[in-house]
Amino acid sequence: MPRSVIYFGLLLFVAYLISLDPNDAGTTANDFFGWVGSMASNGLDFIDSMVEGSKEPAPVQPR
């Protein structure tokens, strides 16, 4: 199935959701994009700490 048909279907679905309840759809979209933004920020923090490493040496574990 061509991608343009899938994108058109998704666009119609979003339009349908908005037509059902515009206020709730806007709130849900805001929550979703906030979640995506926080996940992106957490991912960048993870990558940053993985590359830079810890400033302090790791504690030695007794055997």
Image (cartoon, helix red, strand yellow):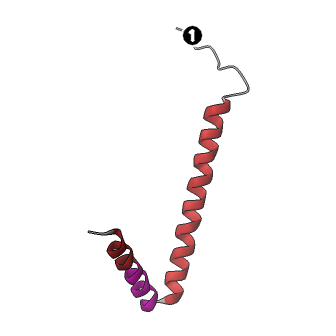
Residue at 37% across, 81% down? 13
Residue extending farthest to the top is 63
Could you tell me what secondary structure mostly forms the magenta stretch?
helix
> Is 15 a magenta residue?
yes
Residue at the limit of the structure toward the right, as seen here: 55
Q: Nearer the viewer, residue 21 or 2?
A: 2
Q: Residues within 10 Å of mark 1 (few under 14, many from 20)?
A: few
Compared with 12, 37 (above or below) is above
Does 13 sit left or right of 39 as displayed? Answer: left
Q: Residue at x 55, y 79 (%)?
A: 27
- Please give the name of the residue rendered at 26% of the width and 68% of the height, measured from the top-left corner: 1
Residue 25 rendering spot, x and y as whole percentages: 49, 82
- The kind of residue tagged 1 is Pro
Q: Secondary structure at mark 1?
A: loop
Confirm whether the magenta stretch covers residue 18. Answer: yes
Whole-percent x, y for residue 56 in the image = 72, 23
**Residue 32: image location, x then y, percent:** 52, 68
Q: Residue furthest left?
A: 1
Q: Quadrant of residue 61?
A: top right
Q: Quadrant of residue 36?
A: bottom right
For disc 1, the marked residue is 62
Q: Which residues are the magenta region?
A: 11-20
Q: Quadrant of residue 16?
A: bottom left
Residue displayed at 60% across by 49% down: 42
- In the image, is residue 4 above or below residue 61? below
